[in-house]
């Protein structure tokens, strides 16, 4: 099964610089090149998207669509900069992407609330060219390119990050992060999965994709896994479950964290790598 013959993913925004060029930031963005056109998955926080695109010679004016994995600032904050280059463009995302998202932390008797949602209002982004395409369902947005929509939570250990909340009236409740979604490419080598943060859980995500597309293996899985920011039980059980999947190559980024990535690399073997700024993934 596969329709895409040529796939090239270039990490434009990420926390780590592993080469002599590029800007690092707490954020994530990937420039996608396929047989059928170029796309952008997430936009980073807005610090490095334009300079890194120029540095790695990726022409943002060529992209046909923007896909947002979820509504946190570190994946969406660079959208105005992207729009300044491309003008009007379809932006695929979940209807909950503009929810009032916060990080709520408790330190002794002090509670700190930090807004971590999309920095700009929807109307402002639309006036600058964003044509939002909201959907909750699994869909093919281009030949061989699938967007998962809402990912069912089907296991009992991927409970997520307790700090991530959404404002409801005057209250802050745990954000269900229904807007979290992944991008999937059906290639001649097999399925390639691109994750934003995998807030739904990397295992829930892969299980959902496997069921939807009737596959039992993945050629590659890349992106943020949030495994560096969850509890020990979720990390351990996710790692064990990952070993049961047939994955040829797996690349960690962003919210996976350096320490967690080292552990995952050690446990998963030579098919695992860190996808830092400027890293290029291609079908082999």
Image (cartoon, rainbow, N blue to C red):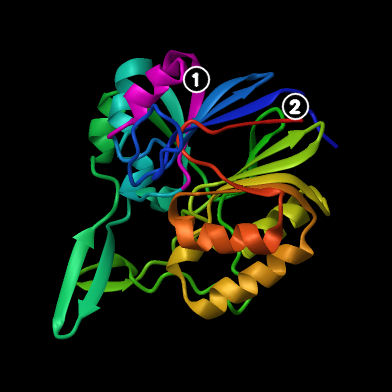
Q: Position of residue 250 (x, y in %)?
A: 66, 49
Q: Which residue lies furthest to the bottom in this view?
A: 109
Image quarter for residue 173?
bottom left
Q: Residue furthest left?
A: 110
The numbered mark at residue 63 is 1
**Magenta residue check for 50:** yes
Q: Give the range drawn in magenta.
A: 47-69
Residue drawn at point x = 57 percent, y = 64 percent: 263
Q: Position of residue 54 (x, y in %)?
A: 39, 17
Residue drawn at point x = 77 percent, y = 30 percent: 284
Q: In this view, does 67 lie above or below 220?
A: above
Left or right: 69 with respect to 15? right
Q: Is residue 231 above or below residue 93?
A: below
**Residue 1 seen in render:** yes
Image quarter for residue 144?
top right
Residue drawn at point x = 29 percent, y = 35 percent: 46
The numbered mark at residue 43 is none
Residue 86 or 264: which is nearer the viewer? 264
Residue drawn at point x = 70 percent, y = 27 percent: 143
Q: Position of residue 232 (x, y in %)?
A: 51, 78
Q: Residues within 10 Å of mark 1 (few under 14, many from 20)?
A: some
Residue at mark 2: 4
Residue 102 or 173: which is nearer the viewer? 102
Mark 2 lies on a secondary structure that is loop
Mark 1 lies on a secondary structure that is strand
Mark pair 1, 2: CA separation: 17 Å
N-terminal of the two: label 1 or label 2?
A: 2
Q: Where is residue 229 in the image (x, y as percent from the top left)?
A: 43, 66
């Amino acid at each position: 099964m596969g329709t895409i013959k040529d796939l090239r993913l270039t990490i434009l925004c990420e926390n780590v610089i592993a080469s002599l060029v590029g800007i690092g930031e707490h954020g994530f963005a990937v420039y996608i090149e396929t047989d059928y056109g170029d796309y952008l998955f997430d936009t980073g926080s807005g610090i490095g998207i334009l300079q890194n695109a120029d540095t790695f010679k990726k022409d943002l004016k060529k992209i046909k669509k923007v896909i947002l994995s979820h509504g946190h600032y570190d994946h969406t904050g660079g959208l105005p900069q992207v729009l300044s280059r491309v003008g009007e463009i379809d932006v695929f995302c979940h209807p909950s992407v503009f929810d009032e998202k916060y990080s709520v932390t408790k330190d002794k008797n002090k509670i700190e609330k930090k807004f971590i949602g999309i920095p700009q209002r929807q109307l402002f982004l639309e006036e600058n060219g964003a044509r939002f395409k909201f959907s909750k369902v699994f869909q093919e947005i281009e030949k061989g390119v699938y967007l998962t929509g809402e990912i069912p939570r089907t296991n009992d250990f991927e409970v997520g990050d307790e700090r991530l909340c959404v404002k409801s009236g005057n209250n802050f409740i745990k954000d269900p992060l229904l807007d979290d979604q992944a991008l999937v490419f059906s290639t001649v080598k097999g399925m390639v999965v691109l994750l934003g943060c995998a807030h739904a859980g990397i295992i829930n995500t892969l299980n959902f994709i496997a069921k939807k597309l009737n596959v039992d293996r993945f050629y590659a899985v890349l992106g943020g896994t949030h495994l560096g920011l969850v509890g020990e039980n979720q990390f351990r059980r996710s790692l064990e479950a990952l070993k049961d999947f047939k994955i040829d190559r797996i690349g960690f980024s962003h919210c996976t964290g350096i320490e967690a990535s080292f552990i995952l690399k050690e446990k998963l073997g030579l098919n695992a790598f860190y996808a830092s700024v400027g890293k290029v993934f291609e079908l082999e």
